[in-house]
Image: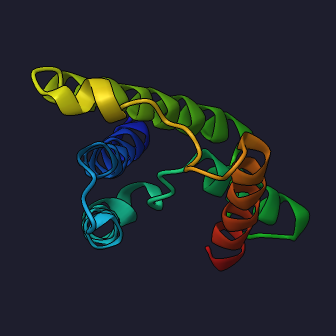
Amino acid sequence: RALEVSEFVGTFFLVLTVCLNLVTGSLSVAWSASAALLSMIFSLGDVSGAHFNPAVSFAVYVSTSLRSSPRPFPRDRLWRYFLAQCAAATGAAVASGLVLAQSNLAEEQFGVQPGAGHSLATAGFVEVIFTTLLIFVV
């Protein structure tokens, strides 16, 4: 179960870092998220491949299934990664809420919504574009 634990830990710290930065209104989200991601990749990449995102895991699965890969990504591992990553993201969101529960920031800013002047559809479209870019790069 080292693979799933690795995915859980990496996803947890990446999502926790992003959540805490966004809730506190930090201007250094890109820097701290990058530092967290690189730290997790360097420390856990040799264990699980450091996917830390269900979209990346799915892309790796499809990529190794479509071509004759000498090391295909098994479907059962895909589901275990999905579960570990989703549990980690949920846990990180809860943890960031607990950390900020004593401050007014949690009440004022914890709701995730598009910025002023942007619709949910626009935000979703941009999310799809950048997730596709992420998958393409990985």
Residue ID at (72%, 60%): 126
* Rendering coords of residue 116 (x, y %): 57, 50
Q: Is residue 27 left or right of residue 102?
A: right
Taking 64 as reference, is 81 above or below it? above
Residue ID at (63%, 69%): 134
Residue ID at (41%, 45%): 7
* Rendering coords of residue 38 (x, y %): 31, 71
What colour scheme has been applied to the protein in the rendered image?
A: rainbow
Residue 121 seen in the current view: yes
Quadrant into which the N terminus falls = top left
Q: Is residue 37 left or right of residue 120?
A: left
Name the residue nearer the viewer: 134 or 66.
134
Residue ID at (47%, 52%): 52
Name the residue nearer the viewer: 128 or 68.
128
Taking 1 as reference, is 14 above or below it? below
* Rendering coords of residue 132 (x, y %): 74, 65
Taking 65 as reference, is 68 above or below it? below
Residue 92 seen in the current view: no
